Image: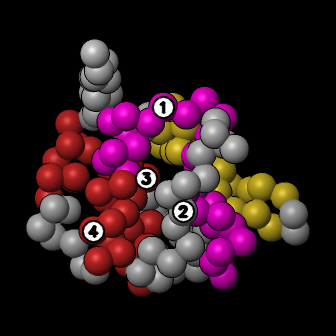
């Protein structure tokens, strides 16, 4: 007998975001990002952290870590030290964060716009520290 896991109940604005991105994606990489993040938020709890973007994979040295189901840490590593780390309660809030106001970029740009500019280069989907 197979036991089915109930999906984690997501924030309403995350549900709307995932629903819109089924048809409104800007590239195949963005489509993949939202499909995989939806799966993770619904079924993949992490207590040790799930590295979504490593500071080593981009010129701004920005990192994104998913915690629990749908909480995120966004920050930067400068001179080997974490700085400007901010906690977000949902993917929607994370993607709408203004990187300049968080001292992560010189220009006013949201995280989602920046991810689109780099076409999600460096995003990882198999870096959950619970399983490593």
Query: SS at mark 3?
Result: helix
Who comes first in sequence, dot 2 or dot 4?
Answer: 4
Q: Tell me residue 3's x, y (percent).
A: 31, 18
Who comes first in sequence, dot 2 or dot 3?
Answer: 3
Confirm whether the magenta stretch covers residue 59.
yes
Who comes first in sequence, dot 3 or dot 4?
Answer: 4
Q: Label 1 neighbourhood size at 10 Å, few (<14), some (14-19), many (20+)?
A: some
Q: Which residue is mark 3?
A: 94
Looking at the rendered image, the disc whose residue lies closer to the viewer, 1 or 3, is 1
Quadrant position of residue 35 = bottom left
Who comes first in sequence, dot 1 or dot 4?
Answer: 4
Query: SS at mark 1?
Result: loop
Q: Label 3 neighbourhood size at 10 Å, few (<14), some (14-19), many (20+)?
A: many
> Distance from label 1 to label 2 (Cα)?
16 Å
Who comes first in sequence, dot 1 or dot 2?
Answer: 1
Q: Is residue 55 left or right of residue 69?
A: right
Q: Which residue is mark 4?
A: 31
């Amino acid at each position: 007998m197979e036991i089915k896991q109930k999906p984690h109940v997501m924030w309403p604005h995350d549900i709307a975001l995932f629903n819109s991105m089924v048809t409104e994606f800007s590239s195949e990489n963005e489509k993949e990002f939202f499909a995989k993040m939806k799966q993770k938020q619904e079924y993949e709890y992490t207590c040790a952290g799930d590295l979504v973007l490593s500071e080593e994979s981009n010129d701004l040295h920005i990192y994104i870590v998913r915690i629990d189901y749908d909480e995120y840490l966004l920050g930067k590593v400068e001179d080997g030290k974490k700085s400007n780390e901010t906690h977000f309660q949902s993917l929607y809030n994370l993607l709408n964060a203004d990187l300049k106001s968080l001292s992560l970029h010189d220009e006013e740009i949201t995280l989602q716009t920046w991810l689109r500019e780099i076409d999600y280069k460096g995003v990882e989907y198999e870096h959950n520290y619970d399983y490593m």
